[in-house]
Image (cartoon, rainbow, N blue to C red):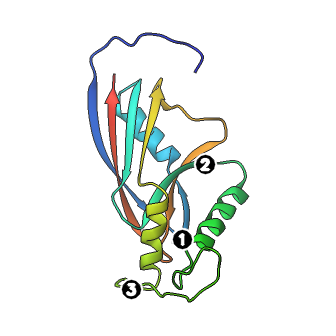
C-alpha cells in the first residue's frame, strides 16, 4: 500500500461463520469466500480476524500460483509429524506410537500439525477487498485424511 491517509469514521463490526467442506488432507483456498464475505458486509476498510474452530486443521497464507509449493509444504509437515508415531528428529531411536487415537490413526498427528501451524489470521482489507500480495491466497490446511466439514469465524471491524 503506497498511500498513507488518516481514516476518520465510525467503526462497525460484523461477525460471520463460514462452512467449508474439505477433500481430506490438503489445502482449500478460502480467498474468494473471504472476499465475498467482506464485500457483502458493506465495510470498505478494516481488519478481519479469521479463526478455524477446530483442533485438527489450520490456516496459512501462501503461494497461489505454483501448486508445487503446497505439495512441498504438506510433504515437509508429514516428515516432521509422521502418522505412525514420534521418534527423535534425528530419525534414530525407538518409534513411540501416539497414545491419543480416539478418532483414528490420523487424529494425534493432526493435532500436532495444528499446534505447529496456526488456527487464526489477522488481515487488512481496503476498498472492500483483502490486502494480499500478488501471489498470495488464504488456505484452510486440512490435517485429517478423510473429508471434513469445517467452520470458521470471520470477525470484521472497520468502516
Is any atom of residue 147 visible in this view?
A: no
The mark nearer the N terminus, 3 or 2, is 2
**What is the secondary structure assignment of the residue under circle 3?**
loop
Position of 95 with respect to 68 (left or right) is left
Q: Considering depth in this image, is 28 or 108 the residue closer to the camera? A: 108
Q: Residue at x 49, y 57 (%)?
A: 117
Is any atom of residue 102 visible in this view?
A: yes
Image coordinates for residue 98, horizontal then vertical, percent: 44, 84
Q: Is residue 135 above or below residue 21?
A: above
Give the alpha-carbon distance from disc 3 to disc 1, as whole Å.
Answer: 21 Å
Badge 2, how many Cα within 10 Å: few under 14, some, many 20+?
some
Residue on which the image places disc 1: 25
Residue on which the image places disc 3: 99
Q: For residue 101, what is the image quadrant?
A: bottom left
Image coordinates for residue 12, horizontal then vertical, percent: 26, 26
Q: Which residue is drawn at 49% across and 61% down?
A: 116
Image coordinates for residue 31, horizontal then vertical, percent: 52, 45
- In the rendered image, the quadrant that contains the N terminus is top right
Q: For residue 14, what is the image quadrant?
A: top left
Asked if disc 1 and disc 2 are in contact, CB closer than 8 Å, the reply is no
Q: Which residue is drawn at 70% across and 48% down?
A: 65
Residue on which the image places disc 2: 62
Q: Considering depth in this image, is 68 or 32 the residue closer to the camera? A: 68
Q: Residue at x 62, y 35 (%)?
A: 133
Give the alpha-carbon distance from disc 3 to disc 2, as whole Å.
Answer: 32 Å
Residue 106 numbered mark, or none = none
Badge 3, how many Cα within 10 Å: few under 14, some, many 20+?
few
Amino acid at each position: 500500500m503506497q498511500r498513507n491517509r488518516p481514516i476518520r469514521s465510525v467503526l462497525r463490526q460484523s461477525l460471520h461463520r463460514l462452512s467449508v467442506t474439505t477433500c481430506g488432507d490438503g489445502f482449500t483456498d478460502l480467498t474468494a469466500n473471504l472476499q465475498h464475505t467482506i464485500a457483502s458486509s458493506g465495510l470498505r476498510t478494516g481488519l478481519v480476524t479469521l479463526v478455524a474452530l477446530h483442533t485438527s486443521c489450520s490456516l496459512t497464507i501462501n503461494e497461489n500460483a505454483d501448486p508445487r509449493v503446497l505439495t512441498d509444504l504438506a510433504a515437509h509437515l508429514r516428515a516432521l509429524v509422521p502418522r505412525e508415531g514420534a521418534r527423535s528428529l534425528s530419525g534414530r531411536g525407538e518409534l513411540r506410537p501416539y497414545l491419543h487415537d480416539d478418532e483414528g490413526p490420523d487424529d494425534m498427528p493432526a493435532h500436532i500439525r495444528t499446534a505447529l501451524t496456526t488456527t487464526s489470521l489477522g488481515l487488512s482489507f481496503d476498498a472492500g477487498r483483502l490486502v494480499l500480495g500478488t501471489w498470495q491466497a488464504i488456505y484452510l490446511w486440512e490435517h485429517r485424511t478423510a473429508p471434513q466439514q469445517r467452520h470458521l469465524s470471520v470477525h470484521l471491524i472497520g468502516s
